[in-house]
Amino acid sequence: MLEGKKVIIGITGGIAAYKIPLLVRLLVKMKATVKIIMTPAAHGFVTPLTLSTLCGHPVLTDPYDKETGAWNSHVDLGKWADLFLIAPLSANTLAKMAHGQSDNLLLTTYLSAQCPVFFAPAMDLDMYKHPTTQQNITLLQQRGNIFIAPATGELASGLCGEGRMKEPAEILEVIKDHFKKKSDFTNKNILITAGPTREPIDPVRYISNYSSGKMGYAIAEAFADRGANVIIISGPVDLAIHNPRINIVPVTTAGEMLDAVNNLSDNIDVFVMTAAVSDYRPAVVAKQKIKKEDAGEVVLSLKKNKDILAHIGKNKTSKQLVIGFALETENEIDNAIRKLENKNADLIVLNSLNDPGAGFGADTNKISIIDKNGRVKRFSLKGKKEVAQDIVDTVKKIIL
Ligand code: CTP
């Protein structure tokens, strides 16, 4: 099932490195192509000869070949891989990854990698528990790297506790699961609204909000990575996305967003309404730039925009799933449940402006997902990519 999959394993200096030959063997048996990068310290724990024999490729450590002077391109390696696993990951390399250091080939490849990065820390329990280590793990997670948590058990020091690298068979399952997920939304059509809308006041001014569109775009990528066809109806954002399975329909106003959603809603399986749609628009859009008046106060008359989520919720078929977002500042759960009911959504993703790291513009988010039965599932603060995966996993449980 891993035929054609290209995996890089980065090995750092830790006793658990002795288990990696078995993992390589398991991956190769499943027909994955495996390349290996070792830090200099890893050589003390497992030999490159063992590893290169098992994977069938030279094991790389230096940025260039000392005999020929040929460059071992970290850029090419980073582009080549479908998955980069760093196991065992020492506290030292973890810290370097978290802070952008790049003094060896493993680290430069990490910074160049275009594929999902999985990391499996292994260290003694006190090093593992240390706040620095924990913060570094959180930093990697917030950037979308996937954490393979260590197990609790006997450690090389003779102590017993948390810090043991997961067994090769367990790591293999994580890798298999990742590639299996990549096709679980094949033939599903997803429509996502994202970003802010802009409601013109006159030719040079508008009403809008701080939405960056990052959450909606991350959800689009998460669905597309798992095989879905995705349309983003996007308000003006400063984001680029290059994925053949994602089509972006740019719009400016709430009215344009509504029209685009209506035009494209046939055959949609899942609607995800992340857009921060302006609830109101100026009742009259001045044709010419409004000039300053002598009076100290200007009154702008506003008209209500149609609620796109409520409109889709009302008209959805029994096969369509509709997900709304709620950004709240008080009585969060009650307000979100009310929104779910009023707009006839199937799920509401709640984020609170009271949670540090959640809300507009941030690269992280902290969400709760509420369903029609009022069940609330709370998630921890994570990178928006990981949050997107949690949302996609929740949808999967309902529709697949
Ligand atoms: N939404 C929408 N169309 C609108 C307004 C909101 O589709 N005209 C969607 C948003 O994309 C989001 C959800 O409705 O999925 C909640 O939006 P929010 O602005 O938080 O809720 P409102 O209903 O506008 O309530 P309030 O502003 O009073 O909190």
Image (cartoon, grey):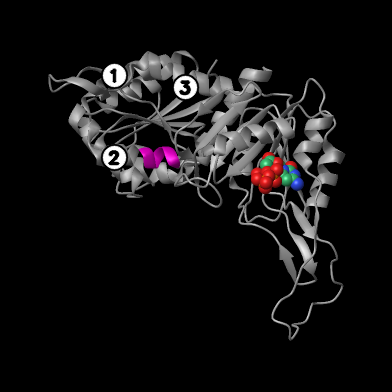
Question: Residue 386, percent across and down?
Answer: 51, 35
Q: Residues within 10 Å of mark 3 (few under 14, many from 20)?
A: some
| Image coordinates for residue 77, horizontal then vertical, percent | 45, 39
In contact (CB < 8 Å): disc 3 and disc 1: no
Q: Nearer the viewer, residue 250 or 307?
A: 307
| Residue in the foreground of this view, choosing between 91 and 234 | 234
Q: Nearer the viewer, residue 31 or 133?
A: 133
In reply to whether residue 139 is colored magenta, the answer given is yes
Residue at mark 3 to residue at mark 1: CA–CA distance:
16 Å
> In front here: 15 or 233?
233
**For the point 40% across and 23% down, which residue is it?**
56
Numbered disc in front, either 2 or 1:
2
- The quadrant in which residue 90 appears is top left
Q: Position of residue 79 (x, y in %)?
A: 51, 40
Q: Quadrant of residue 193?
A: top right
Q: Residue 362 shows which numbered tag?
A: none
Residue with the most extreme left position: 158
Which stretch appears magenta? 138-142
Asked whether, in this view, residue 34 is left or right of residue 241, the answer is: left
Q: Counting other residues with Cα less than 10 Å from the Cα at mark 2, is it few (<14), some (14-19), or many (20 or more)? A: many
The amino acid on which the numbered mark 2 sits, given as a three-letter code, is Thr
Q: Residue at x 34, y 36 (%)?
A: 60
Quadrant for residue 320, please give it: top right
Q: Quadrant of the C terminus?
A: top right
Q: Earlier in the sequence, mark 3 or mark 1?
A: 1
Instruction: Provide the residue designation for mark 2.
Output: 93
Judged from the image, the secondary structure of the residue bearing numbered disc 1 is helix
- Three-letter residue code for mark 3: Ile
Locate residue 172, reporting x and y percent. 43, 17
Q: Residue 253, relative to residue 317: is it above or below?
A: below
Which residue position holds label 3?
175
